[in-house]
Image (cartoon, rainbow, N blue to C red):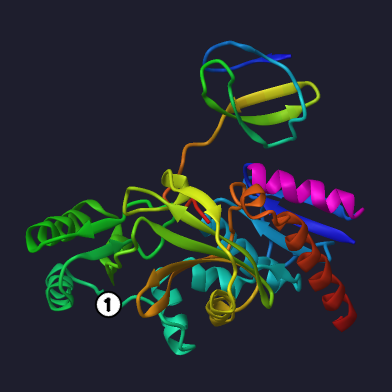
Amino acid sequence: MKIGFLHSVIRPEEKYLIEEFKKRGAEIVMIDDRNLTFNLDKNNFDFDIVLERCINHSRALHSLRLFEAAGIKCVNSYKVATVCGDKLLTSVALKEHGVPQPEVRIAFTEESALKEIEEMGYPVVLKPAVGSWGRLLSKVNDKDAAEAILEHKTVLGSYHHSVFYIQKYIEKNKRDIRAFVIGDKCICAIYRTSDHWVTNTARGGVATNCPVTPELNDIAVKAAKAVGDGILAIDIFETPKGFLVNEVNYTMEFRNSIKTTGVNIPEKIVDYVIKAAKENGKQN
Amino acid sequence: MTECPVCGLKLEQNSLIKNELFSCPDCGAELEVTEINPLEVKEAPKEEEDWGE
């Protein structure tokens, strides 16, 4: 079996996955997106499947589309990357599939965004539709802050910062949940705890094990199905009224979660990819 | 054997693989392995706006 391993830099996650593929005797073809080119008339790739592990969303997205156009099955798929890479599209998919999430509003001008924020009530969180690791998130506590941030985004940001994704701030008592879903199952989860309102481990949030209850499994798998299924990390808020899905990540990081949960996450990912490649081979 | 491009520390190949990120044990600069035999490194690429999960 030949695995196309789409990557740029190799982080601990990629190294774990490579080691796991080698244990299975799978042949890995390393595809560095910095050297990757496509010729639409001559694309002919000799892989059974591509596993996407890029660090750049834009490269992942377009490479997946191009590999799929060349008939190669990809994990995750272009559709999943498209939906998860854009918080607006994620929210729409969650809504369409009845997955609970915090209140979200979208606006395209400073004026209309401010009107929506005032109507929602403070605090709210302004997020770039495309972005990760908690970058450029703004907790907006009052109208003065809202006006300033909206103006700064409009004047200083590139055009996509003028798509205003506004999420109701959820009081999360210093922690949220990161649930890891592979296929039909939430394989494990962590609490991410921080004194800061941004709890991403990339921003210093501390990981501890979170038991996977039937309720947690249910919402995490529903969220994964809503965005198109695959290997996904679901960020979830705990509220008195139940779980709310915050975001869904399609190139998940898990270096802090293997020992924490006791679950061999790369092994589960490789199981899924090899199974998907075999099933795809049978169909073709 | 190669040197850290930031501080000049001599670096040895341990179990590094091509394109792997690692921190210089002396100055902490984030480096990327460009070749493994013999070891060659460069400063890791700077974070871009669409980096992430």
Q: Quadrant of residue A216?
A: bottom right
Q: Which residue is mark 1?
A: A105
Inspect the magenta stretch and tell me whether residue A68 lies in it.
no
Question: Quick one: A2 or A147, which is closer to the camera?
Answer: A147
Magenta stretch bounds: A11-25
Query: Dividing the image into 4 quarters, which one contains the C terminus of chain A?
Result: bottom right
Q: Main secondary structure of the magenta part?
A: helix
Residue B14 lies, in percent from the top left, at: 76, 24
Q: Find the residue positioned furthest to the left.
A: A144
User: What residue sits 82% from the left and 77% below the top?
Assistant: A280
User: What residue sits 58% from the left and 58% below the top?
Assistant: A252
Q: Is residue A44 visible?
A: no
Within-10-Å neighbours for mark 1: few <14, some 14–19, many 20+: some
Disc 1 marks a residue whose amino acid type is Arg
Residue A164 lies, in percent from the top left, at: 26, 68
A248 sits to left or right of A35: left
What's the chain of the residue with tag 1?
A
User: What residue sits 59% from the left and 78% below the top?
Assistant: A214
Question: Quick one: A29 or A192, which is closer to the camera?
Answer: A192
Question: Quick one: A155 or B19, which is closer to the camera?
Answer: B19
User: What residue sits 55% from the left and 61% below the top?
Assistant: A210
Depicted A200 relative to depicted A181: above or below: above
Residue A103 lies, in percent from the top left, at: 30, 78
Q: Quadrant of residue A104?
A: bottom left
A226 sits to left or right of A262: left
Depicted B51 relative to depicted B12: above or below: below
Query: Dividing the image into 4 quarters, which one contains the N terminus of chain A?
Result: bottom right
Q: Is residue A180 visible?
A: yes
A170 sits to left or right of A265: left
